[in-house]
Amino acid sequence: MSPEQIADWASAHLTDPLDVDCTTTVMLKILDGKCKMGPRDKDVIPLLYDALRGRPGRLLGEDMHMLIARARAGEREALVAEIYEHRVLAETAISRPVMKGYKARLREAGVLGAGAD
């Protein structure tokens, strides 16, 4: 899928506020260096995130989006502890079955490759 197709798919299919939370959480994991996805999948998540970040999440607020924006703008090294803290909180807020279901949907749609857990 092209970046445009990924963004279009996200806009059409990731409509639940929990989808925003899951995508935000994976972004935090990538920024924290704790994401075990392959390089291609790590490149896909920011595309999904960019397509969804303007939508409200159910559990995670604007503070997470502001942190991610700061990290992506070059402050990542200065934010290591804060990213870690928010990543752990986000992972705690979202149950493992919800996160696994989210990733399974992405794999089934061909957005992520196999073994994206």
Image (cartoon, grey):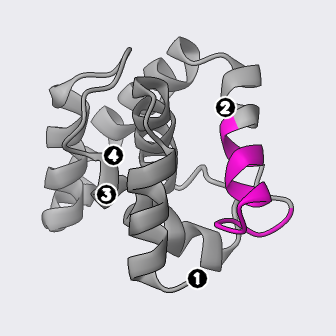
Question: In the rendered image, which residue does mark 2 sit on?
Answer: 99
For the residues labelled 1 and 4, the Cα–Cα distance comes to 32 Å
Q: Earlier in the sequence, mark 3 or mark 4?
A: 3
Task: Tell which of 9 and 59 is nearer to you.
Answer: 9
Identify the residue at the far right of this view: 115
Residue at x-position 33% and y-position 25%: 57
For the residues labelled 3 and 4, the Cα–Cα distance comes to 25 Å
Viewer-nearest of discs 1 and 4? 1
Instruction: Judge the density around disc 4: few (<14), some (14-19), many (≥20) Cα neighbours within 10 Å.
Output: some
**Amino acid on which disc 4 is placed:** Val
| Magenta-tinted stretch | 102-114
Rendered position, 102 above or below 113:
above
Is residue 32 visible from the viewing direction of this image?
no
Position of 44 with respect to 100 (left or right) is left
Residue 1 is tagged as 1
For mark 3, give the secondary structure: helix
Q: Earlier in the sequence, mark 1 or mark 3?
A: 1
Position of 5 with respect to 109 (left or right) is left
**Amino acid on which disc 2 is placed:** Met
Quarter occupied by residue 94: top right
- Quadrant holding the N terminus: bottom right
Residue 51 is tagged as 3
Rendered location of residue 61, percent (x, y): 23, 22
CB under 8 Å between callouts 2 and 4? no
For mark 2, give the secondary structure: helix
